[in-house]
Image (cartoon, rainbow, N blue to C red):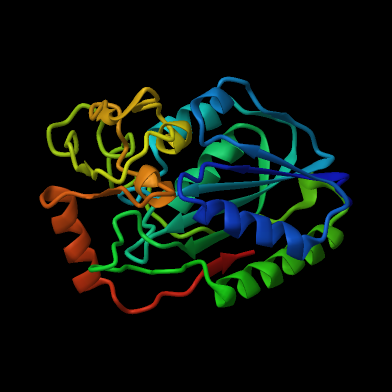
Amino acid sequence: MKTESIKLVYFSPTGTTKTAVREIARGINPGTVEELDITRPGARIQQLRTSEKELLIVGVPVYLGRVPALVTEWLHAIQAHNTPVVCVVVYGNRAYEDALLELHDILALRGCKPVAGAAFIGEHSFSTAETPTAVGRPDAGDLEHAERFGQKIQEKLRSVASADRIPKIKIPGCHPYRQEPCHPYQKGTAFWNVDFVAVSDACVQCGTCAAGCPVSAIDPENSRAIATENCITCCACIRHCPAHARTIKPGLVSDVSLRLYTLYKERKEPEFFI
């Protein structure tokens, strides 16, 4: 079958998921690519409608082994009609558990036809200079794998006459899913409702952090004011601060960062299912 265009859909606060799906698309070598970045709240208002003539590549980060709940809410509103889809998750070198299976299930339920699935590694949101986890991932090796994966997807699509003929893919994971859905960390619970971002005097109130926050948890007029009950601990504000004025405070999140650094140093490689 021949698709007329490719549509990339991604939730990517720190840019790792966006990088992976873009490289997959480059491997497919499409004539037309449209990107839908659903990271910012305003982008998650409009529904997505797709047809059999499009190829959809959907990428999301993994939080506690699941697709973040604020993303699943939007995904469940997709209206697709036999749309071939590539399911992509990106995790911080710990484990992706049932996230890829969950993404596959949601998209199939919404009328998509899964062609392939992949799990990539991205630098963990809690990675720091002192406790680095998967620094620089996805790296050149990951992107080379992604491009080749895209080429294989193209070959598979050419081998079938229509979306109805796409063979089913087997995705690892468990039913029921092993973790509870999260926001991405159980919105409203005391465990993750923490004030963990330190803001130094280097802050010039440029507004970059507020503009990039996926849940509008930072006051655009005062970047020190953070609505911790909305914060999803993605650390995008820390990563994107041009003045390097934001860091992780000592406490719960820094303890998790140390644990990740201690337990998950060994490099994991992307996994593909096609």
Residue 169 visible in the picture: no
Of the pair 1 and 230, the residue shown nearer to us: 230
Q: Quadrant of the C terminus?
A: bottom right
**Residue in the picture at 36% in, 57% down:** 97
Please state if 139 lies on the left or on the right of 96 as rendered: right
Please state if 27 lies on the left or on the right of 38 as rendered: right
Relative to 246, is 182 above or below? above
**Residue in the picture at 30% in, 49% down:** 64
Residue 218 visible in the picture: yes
Of the pair 1 and 212, the residue shown nearer to us: 212
Residue 164 in percent (x, y) is at: 78, 45
Residue 94 in percent (x, y) is at: 32, 64
**Residue in the picture at 75% in, 65% down:** 27
**Residue in the picture at 38% in, 69% down:** 134
Relative to 173, is 228 above or below? above
Please state if 115 lies on the left or on the right of 96 as rendered: right
Residue 126 in percent (x, y) is at: 29, 56
Of the pair 96 and 192, the residue shown nearer to us: 192
Q: Quadrant of residue 213?
A: top left
Q: Quadrant of residue 232?
A: top left
Tally of marks: 0
